[in-house]
Image (cartoon, grey):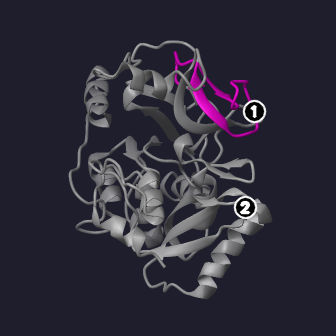
Amino acid sequence: MMGPWLVFGALLNGATMVFYDGAPDYPDIDRVWALVERHHITHLGISPTLIRSLKPHGADPVQRHDLSSLRAVASTGSPWDPESWLWTFHTVLNSEKPILNYSGGTEISGGILCGDFFRPLKPCAFSGPVVGMDADVVDEIGNPVRGAVGELIIRQPWIGMTRGFWQDRERYLDTYWRKLPGVWVHGDFAAIDEDGLWYILGRSDDTIKVGGKRLGPAEVEAILNSHPAVKESAVIGAPHPVKDQEVVGFVVLRAGVEPSETLRAALIDLVTAELGKPLKPRTVLFVTALPKTRNAKVMHRVIRAAYLDLPLGDLSSLENAGTVEVIRQAQ
């Protein structure tokens, strides 16, 4: 979807498009920043996953290149963690230019939330809804909520709205319309803070419920990712007879860091200190890779199914089937 948007969006605006097909760290780890300098790129499209893979190499690969042409970094694909957002803002954008966060969906044929050049931003935030989108965040019975996690919904039709699934009307209605009648339920958890800034916190299908509290995986993953030993992480909810679910974390360590019980305990304590004892993880498991789609989105449902030995479902979008066995053998 992003490819066609880039093509007709750039042509409509009389802009030049820059495409690169290949690994972002080949032939060297500064490949992305070299492209910006060579082609005087003004708007650089990235994903938080890409930044998390480049950030461990430090600021030097960025600082080798003149990035003065950049007006903004645009981001989509997965939720940010604050550390990666701030690294991008300070290191790539010299603390002077915006990160234009963007979220929508194929079934939206566009965006729901976006950043802009006009309002101040906080780490990981969106400025607000895309023009023409009547979006809101509501609780389980459909009441608007502020300063708390809720469902991202849309109250009015829009130009690109999907009108149905091919030969499967009931599935379409079940997916978007029957959870909260009369509004489009997108399937993302979101929040709006006291300053009116918006946040996407992950898929509501991936919600972890611990003792009646709803927890988005991105909340826990941001804490785990803040540890200097962690390259990236994913979190799921595992069944518990009393608390409904418990948090289980899967962590990919940075190069040169070895798994240990001491590190596992430190990561569990880190999450517990941030979220409180009731949300203490059951465990944190060390893995070499996480199941992802071809556009680098972590597949939480596959992780959960592999860990609990449940049916895996559709794996057609999985980039590397071997990562399923990695989860099954996690220690």
The residue sitting at 27% across, 47% down in the picture is 39
Q: Is residue 327 above or below residue 159?
A: below
Residue 6 pos. (x, y %): 30, 32
The residue sitting at 66% across, 44% down in the picture is 122
Q: Is residue 155 above or below residue 126?
A: above
Q: Which residue is mark 2?
A: 279
Residue 292 pos. (x, y %): 37, 56
Lateral position of residue 221 relative to residue 317, left or right:
right
Q: Please tell me how crowded label 1 is: few (under 14), some (14-19), or many (20+) other residues with Cα within 10 Å.
A: some
Main secondary-structure element of the magenta-colored stretch: loop
| Mark nearer the viewer, 2 or 1 | 2
Magenta segment, which residues? 130-154
Residue 61 pos. (x, y %): 39, 67
Check residue 133 for magenta coloring: yes
| Secondary element at tag 1 | loop
The residue sitting at 55% across, 37% down in the picture is 188
Check residue 101 for magenta coloring: no
Instruction: Residue 266: name its quadrant.
Output: bottom right
| Secondary element at tag 2 | helix
Q: Quadrant of the N terminus?
A: top left
Q: Which residue is mark 1?
A: 146
Residue 233 visible from this viewpoint: yes
Residue 270 versus residue 41: which sits nearer the camera?
A: 270
Dot 2 and dot 1 residues touching (CB under 8 Å): no
Q: Amino acid at mark 2?
A: Leu
Residue 127 versus residue 135: which sits nearer the camera?
A: 135
Q: Amino acid at mark 1?
A: Arg
- Marks 2 and 1 sit apart, C-alpha to C-alpha, by 22 Å
Residue 268 pos. (x, y %): 66, 73
Pointer 2 or 1: first along the chain: 1
